[in-house]
Amino acid sequence: MTQPAPSAQHNGPDKGTPAAPSDTPPSKSGGGMPALGLRLDVRILSLLGVLAALVLVGGITEPDAFLDTGNLQLILTQASVIGVVTVGMTFVIISGGIDLSVGAMVALASVWATTLATQEYGFAGIAFTAVIVGLAAGLVNGVLIAYGNMVPFIATLAMLASARGLALQITDGKTQIVTVDPVLDLGLPDSYILGVPPLVIMFAVVVIVGWLILNRTTFGRRTVAVGGNAEAARLAGIDVRRQRLYLYLLSGLCCGIAAFMLIVLAGSGQNTNGNLYELDAIAAAIIGGTLLSGGRGTIVGSVLGVLIFTTITNIFALNNLQSDVQQIAKGAIIVAAVLVQGRTMRGRET
């Protein structure tokens, strides 16, 4: 499920000419990579087991409410919005970066796309504006990080503050109601295709495209190479700065798509949209097996991480547990995932 990384990623650059990224999977005779692949398969199976256990818990505690078709559709729909953001975040983290501004970019894109001036252009105007604003914000992050040599943490933290402030200025603290019927209709049951909400279908398309890019394209191989060893990737002929720029553009694009999906789901644009999305996206990616240090990650694992978090939130809500308990549980899960990652990496080194 993961893309094999270039040999330079694991061993660093040789004293001679560095080897270019290769499409050929490592030989099974090496011993190391088959074990890594096995661990990743076990991780995916473990995530599926956790998700199944959560479904069982939900079915036992609130059988009528949790297993209701409408509730399951709600879980998938809510997972779709943060899931699209998580796909972009997964690429960024695999490359060794981080993006703390995804929630703020979603908020900015959603309020810019729901102003009265934008809504005059109808469905296309709202969708186009949300995507363009997300791309523009991602471009700023990419330029600052790739060509301004800013630390990703600092650059995206600055974008978080700036985007939130601009979103508040645009809305003046008010909710912007969407009046474009074709947009609102996407969130109605009548628009479901074979019982599947359109937002879930959009999410599935983003996941499939993301998986193909990461696992079947040169762009994906370069992303893994940059995250594993940026200097080795540069010596192998990869333009590391341009790759990082493209990755933050990709993250911004995902935020723009998620903003449009959130507009459909909420029927409005607010400066508070996307609150703590950065926490949920990073946590889902980590739980899914993406290393914070870069160089490894899976789209499938990240999607399972999103579904786990969304299911937990839904179970807590059905059982009338307070939101602070949900946040504590999420924090504990993140800590556990990082500890497991640390033990896995130490096991690989010994």
Image: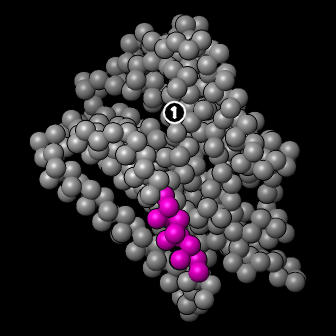
Could you say where residue 276 lies in the image, as x and y percent from the top left?
Answer: 52, 39
Drawn side of residue 350 relative to residue 60, left or right: right
In the depicted structure, whether residue 185 falls above or below residue 43:
above
Could you say where residue 94 lies in the image, as x and y percent from the top left?
Answer: 62, 60
Residue shown at the point (72%, 63%) measured from the top left:
226
Residue shown at the point (53%, 77%) measured from the top left:
344
Quarter of the image holding residue 178? top left
In the depicted structure, whether residue 64 falls above or below residue 58:
above
Drawn side of residue 67 relative to residue 84, left or right: left
Residue shown at the point (77%, 78%) measured from the top left:
12
Q: Nearer the viewer, residue 172 or 29?
A: 172
Label 1: element kind:
loop
Using a 10 Å C-alpha cutoff, classify the residue at mark 1 as few (fewer than 14 neighbours), some (14 to 19) or many (20 or more): many
The secondary structure that dominates the magenta segment is helix
Could you say where residue 234 lies in the image, as x and y percent from the top left?
Answer: 82, 65
In the displayed image of the protein, which residue is found farthest to the bottom?
A: 29
In the displayed image of the protein, which residue is found farthest to the left?
A: 64
Question: Three-letter amino acid code at disc 1?
Answer: Gly
Could you say where residue 10 lies in the image, as x and y percent from the top left?
Answer: 69, 78
Please give the count of numbered marks on the rendered protein: 1
In the depicted structure, whether residue 300 falls above or below residue 99:
below
Tell me if I can see residue 125 in this picture.
no
Residue shown at the point (40%, 23%) measured from the top left:
266
Bounds of the magenta segment: 334-346
Residue under label 1: 274
Q: Nearer the viewer, residue 163 or 113?
A: 163
